[in-house]
Image (spheres, coloured by chain):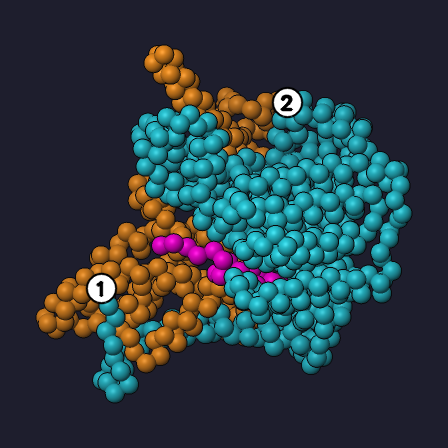
Chain colours: A cyan, B orange
């Protein structure tokens, strides 16, 4: 228990503060001062040296386009977060308002830009967007499955939760038939939102706050997306957010191998083997990450690299060439030609996703294993007696126990993806690969500051990433409590 | 019936082991290629990239050592200094937070804690300008001081919880004997928190060994670069003699492997017990 030292006795104990002094000074100078300076200079035209004059909101206007809707959106985001878990009239209204307001905002933007119908419905659209159809179906179908498993507690309301993902699936299909993406998604969200608000009231269901919150967040995200696309801000910056969205989606899939590995290691009966597997899984961690990244860069080398050779050797290359033929990828893969993974603008994003295969994160595996250790062997025996299959055991015994860790890792992964850019800087150069395909916001900030000499503008970009991450961290702290 | 049940069990056990072997093989494959290639000339590599080949060209290693030794010593100097200064500062600060509740200690606690939530993306540019104003560009001090400032926060948070669990009687006894606070820190807290301090130190070491952006911005001289930047520069600057490059990567991994060998038991245990959760 800490000892209380009141104001009266501080005179005698003042020297205790000396224990803290160096740390506080260091943090103040090297953590707080830069943060404050970044905020300050985001209102300046600044090159890091002599040029430094006040320009007001100029930088933010250049990044965001119209500033006011963004500020409103951020405030709404925050309000929804604050009231997300409560079940009173105020929070319900807020959620409703945020949903409607965001969709209205999107509608106004669309009307202003005339983007409602990119092309009228026709079957040729369906055919030309074939690969998009496949991707959308696979992706949202996957999400549907994930939610099917995640939301099992309140089975009474399950269909309402599923509605929101099904809505995304429907929107993706609508998009494929030729409507503009923003129109498709906001239309479906509007219908889904009305359903979420009206149907439960008719059926007198009690707890659907989760679905409403989820819906509010989804509509906020769509407003975010629409604003990013059509508000006339910096297109490079918002293009970067598209890349980030794709990366995050795939990083979620890439969490699965770690979970599976941890579960399988946990199920192995022999204690000694269990220990040795753990030790072996630490090896990838002690090899410096930089070395691992550079080895992968070497793998991707078109003619000498191992990756293309493995593809040819395992005949995957033939499949890719065949798929190129039927799906119309435009001859990226041809027989006899080695694809340049880090130099072809259509292949850089896949390369960024593939690197690190099989994506077994060592820290992840060890953390999941720690979570799994709480399972008593008797639980397994009981499950065996009941005739549970391996998959059932996974879903009903192991998954619930590591759910906390999975959620933490998920949020940490999203935050990490938002702010990491060193690996892109190394694999592709400072311009983000051919045609700037992978110019993510962090890298863009870095380039603006250190090559283009627009430090003030870079500070404004950094600040926007900062606020996004802050919102995510707040979400994390509110919804994902670590049980210690 | 029983025998059938058993054979099914054995079969599923074997399947599990096979699965783990498969995943392990895939994850370790890059390192296998690294070591196998490190002893080859380019001609040998093009002929057979898959397996070890003889003659194993050890001269690749001597050549690579000439390229990377300065990076390695730089990084070791930077990380060891950083870790020791951080340890010193964290012990003191954590001791303060764990043992006393004084006016302002809540404020200072949150002063540190908020930084754990604050992302540092926007900080880089002003930090660079600040270091320039202090005339610290192109020095090791810049890297050390920034890493100490950033690294101590999580450590203070973890160490505080740890010190609070140390029995109060020990401190009381020391005070009766007339020990000063500094003596209490170094004679009671320091010896008792050895395992947690070393885990934190190793984690910080791994982080520093991979630190890329800050040294890239701060350090100009090639002879002063730390490992990560040096390796990337090597990758892009030299003529692609893969064997030498891979030998360099292998050498760059060795210090971490050595540290791991000495602390393996502690590390696997500490990570599994969730020390990393923070």
Relative to A306, residue A69 above or below: below
Give the extent of the magenta segment.
Answer: A464-484
Q: Chain of mark 1?
A: B
Give the main secondary structure of the magenta stretch: helix
**In what element is the residue under mark 2?**
loop
**Badge 1 density bin: few <14, some 14–19, many ≥20, Cα 10 Å:** some
- Does residue B240 appear in this view? no
Give the quadrant of residue A222.
Answer: bottom right
Q: Chain of mark 2?
A: A
Query: Which residue shows up at 64% across the image and 22% down it?
Result: A313
Residue A468 magenta-drawn? yes
Which residue is outermost to the left? B177
Residue B186 — which label?
A: 1
Which is nearer the eye, A74 or B264?
A: A74
**In what element is the residue under mark 1?**
helix
Residue A314 — which label?
A: 2
Give the quadrant of residue B245.
Answer: top right
Residue A317: percent from left, percent from top: 70, 26
Which is nearer the eye, A41 or A379?
A: A379
- Locate the C terminus of chain B and report the quarter of the image it occupies: bottom left
- Relative to B156, is A333 on the left or the right? right
């Amino acid at each position: 228990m800490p000892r209380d030292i009141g104001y009266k006795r501080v005179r005698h104990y003042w020297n205790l503060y000396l224990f803290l002094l160096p740390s506080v000074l260091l943090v103040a100078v090297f953590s707080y001062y830069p943060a404050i300076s970044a905020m300050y200079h985001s209102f300046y035209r600044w090159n890091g040296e002599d040029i430094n004059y006040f320009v007001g909101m100029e930088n933010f206007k250049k990044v965001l386009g119209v500033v006011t809707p963004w500020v409103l959106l951020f405030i709404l985001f925050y309000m929804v977060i604050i009231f997300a878990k409560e079940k009173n009239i105020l929070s319900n209204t807020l959620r409703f308002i945020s949903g409607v307001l965001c969709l209205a905002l999107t509608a106004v933007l669309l009307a202003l830009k005339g983007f409602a119908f990119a092309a009228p419905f026709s079957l040729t659209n369906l055919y030309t967007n074939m690969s998009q159809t496949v991707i959308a179906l696979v992706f949202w179908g996957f999400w549907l499955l994930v939610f099917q498993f995640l939301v099992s507690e309140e089975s009474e309301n399950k269909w309402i939760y599923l509605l929101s993902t099904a809505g995304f699936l429907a929107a993706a299909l609508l998009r494929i038939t030729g409507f503009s993406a923003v129109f498709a998604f906001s239309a479906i969200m509007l219908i889904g939102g009305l359903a979420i608000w009206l149907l439960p009231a008719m059926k007198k269901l009690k707890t659907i706050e989760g679905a409403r919150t989820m819906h509010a967040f989804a509509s906020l995200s769509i407003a975010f997306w629409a604003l990013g696309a059509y508000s006339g801000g910096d297109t490079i910056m918002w293009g970067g957010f598209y890349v980030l969205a794709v990366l995050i989606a795939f990083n979620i899939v890439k969490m699965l191998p770690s979970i599976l590995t941890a579960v399988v290691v946990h199920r192995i009966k022999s204690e000694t083997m269990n220990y040795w597997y753990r030790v072996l899984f630490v090896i990838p961690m002690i090899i410096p990450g930089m070395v691992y990244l550079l080895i992968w860069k070497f793998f991707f080398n078109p003619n000498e690299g191992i990756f293309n050779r493995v593809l040819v050797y395992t005949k995957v290359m033939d499949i890719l060439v065949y798929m190129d033929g039927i799906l119309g990828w435009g001859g990226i893969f041809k027989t006899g030609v080695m694809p340049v993974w880090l130099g072809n603008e259509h292949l850089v994003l896949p390369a960024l996703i593939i690197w690190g295969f099989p994506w077994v994160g060592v820290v992840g595996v060890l953390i999941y294993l720690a979570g799994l250790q709480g399972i008593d062997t008797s639980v397994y025996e009981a499950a065996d007696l009941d005739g549970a299959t391996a998959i059932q055991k996974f879903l009903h015994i192991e998954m619930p126990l590591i759910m906390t860790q999975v959620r933490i890792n998920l949020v940490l992964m999203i935050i990490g993806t938002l702010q990491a850019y060193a690996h892109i800087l190394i694999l592709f150069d400072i311009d983000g690969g051919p045609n700037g395909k992978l110019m993510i916001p962090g890298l863009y900030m870095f380039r603006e500051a250190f090559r283009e000499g627009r430090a003030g503008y870079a500070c404004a970009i950094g600040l926007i990433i900062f606020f996004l991450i802050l919102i995510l961290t707040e979400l994390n702290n509110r919804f994902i409590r670590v049980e210690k | 019936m029983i025998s059938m049940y058993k054979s099914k069990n054995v079969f599923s056990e074997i399947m599990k082991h096979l699965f783990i072997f498969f995943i392990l093989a895939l994850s370790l494959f890059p390192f296998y290629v690294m070591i196998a290639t490190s002893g080859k000339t380019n001609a040998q590599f093009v002929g057979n990239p898959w397996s070890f080949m003889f003659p194993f060209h050890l001269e690749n290693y001597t050549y690579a050592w000439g390229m990377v030794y300065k990076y390695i010593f730089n990084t070791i100097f930077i990380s060891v200094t950083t870790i020791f200064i951080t340890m010193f500062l964290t012990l003191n600060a954590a001791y303060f937070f764990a043992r006393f509740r004084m006016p302002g200690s809540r404020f200072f606690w949150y002063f540190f804690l908020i930084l754990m939530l604050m992302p540092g993306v926007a900080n880089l540019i002003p930090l660079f300008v600040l270091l320039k104003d202090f005339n610290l560009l192109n020095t090791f001090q810049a890297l050390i001081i920034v890493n100490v400032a950033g690294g101590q926060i999580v450590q203070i948070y973890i160490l505080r919880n740890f010190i609070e669990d140390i029995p109060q009687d020990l401190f009381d006894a020391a005070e009766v004997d007339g020990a000063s606070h500094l003596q209490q820190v170094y004679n009671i807290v320091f010896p008792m928190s050895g395992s947690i301090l070393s885990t934190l130190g190793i984690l910080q070491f791994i982080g520093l060994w991979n630190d890329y952006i800050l040294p890239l911005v701060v350090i100009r001289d090639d002879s002063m670069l730390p490992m990560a930047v040096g390796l990337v520069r090597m990758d892009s600057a030299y003529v692609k003699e893969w064997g030498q490059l891979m030998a360099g990567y292998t050498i760059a991994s060795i210090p971490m492997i050595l540290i791991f060998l000495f602390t393996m038991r502690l590390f696997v245990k500490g990570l599994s017990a969730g020390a990393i959760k923070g």
